[in-house]
Image (cartoon, grey):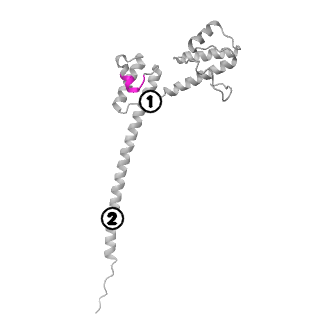
């Protein structure tokens, strides 16, 4: 949750704060900052050392605590948006399946061994954590589903267009036949004079 700061001013803590790799560590840092805010900026030496080690900054005033929380939240949101989809989604279904298989190995073993470079080449980057690898697997599956859905829709649209064209041709043939019959019967017979 973002806390309000002075509106319009740039957050001076944004370039100073480092974002921890693990989400559990980040959650613990937010807890420490809440404790520090409740205790009027006071922390134990161990807590201050933990903050310095993980985010590189130990805020001292309440305003600094708010700025650090906002900077962390902003960086966390940017990272989530950046990691929501893999940087590159393979175009063919075969490459997507292979990438999903490699991501499954990554979820299980946290590496794919010699195929790390291949996975990085296919997706543009390696997932940061197994959770992100699992999320990318779902996104690739969704991309495959959407492509098959679009293909089915294109086939159905082509079939519908063909049916419409055939019906229009039959309708035109019926109309021509009706006009021919109507033209023959509507001609007035000549009067026979005796």
Residue 125 in picture, x, y percent from top left = 42, 23
| Residue bearing mark 1 | 139
Name above or below for residue 137 compared with residue 181. above
Residue 55 in picture, x, y percent from top left = 57, 15
Left or right? Give the position of 1 relative to 91.
right
How far is disc 1 from disc 2 in space, using C-alphas? 52 Å
Q: Magenta part mainly helix, strand or loop? A: helix
Magenta highlight range: 118-125
In the picture, residue 54 is in which quadrant? top right
Circle 2: element type: helix
In the picture, residue 190 is in which quadrant? bottom left
| Residue bearing mark 2 | 174
Residue 189 in picture, x, y percent from top left = 31, 82
Which residue is at the front of the view, 144 or 89?
Answer: 89
In the picture, which quadrant includes the N terminus?
top right
Residue drawn at the location 37% of the way across and 20% of the way down: 117
| Foreground disc of the pair 1, 2 | 1
């Amino acid at each position: 949750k973002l806390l309000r700061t002075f509106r319009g001013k740039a957050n001076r803590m944004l370039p100073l704060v480092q974002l921890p790799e693990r989400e559990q560590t980040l959650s613990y840092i937010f807890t420490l900052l809440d404790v520090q805010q409740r205790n009027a900026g006071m922390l134990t030496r161990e807590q201050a050392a933990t903050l310095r080690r993980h985010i590189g900054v130990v805020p001292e005033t309440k305003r600094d605590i708010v700025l650090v929380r906002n900077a962390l939240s902003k960086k966390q949101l940017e990272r989530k948006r950046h990691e929501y989809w893999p940087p590159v989604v393979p175009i063919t279904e075969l490459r997507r399946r292979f990438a999903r298989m490699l991501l499954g190995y990554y979820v299980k073993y946290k590496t794919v061994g010699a195929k790390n470079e291949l996975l990085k080449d296919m997706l543009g980057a390696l997932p940061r954590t197994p959770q992100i690898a699992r999320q990318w697997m779902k996104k690739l599956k969704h991309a495959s589903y959407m492509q098959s859905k679009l293909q089915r829709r294109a086939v159905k649209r082509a079939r519908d267009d063909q049916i419409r064209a055939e019906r229009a041709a039959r309708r035109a043939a019926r109309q021509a036949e009706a006009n021919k019959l109507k033209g023959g019967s509507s001609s007035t017979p000549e009067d026979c004079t005796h």
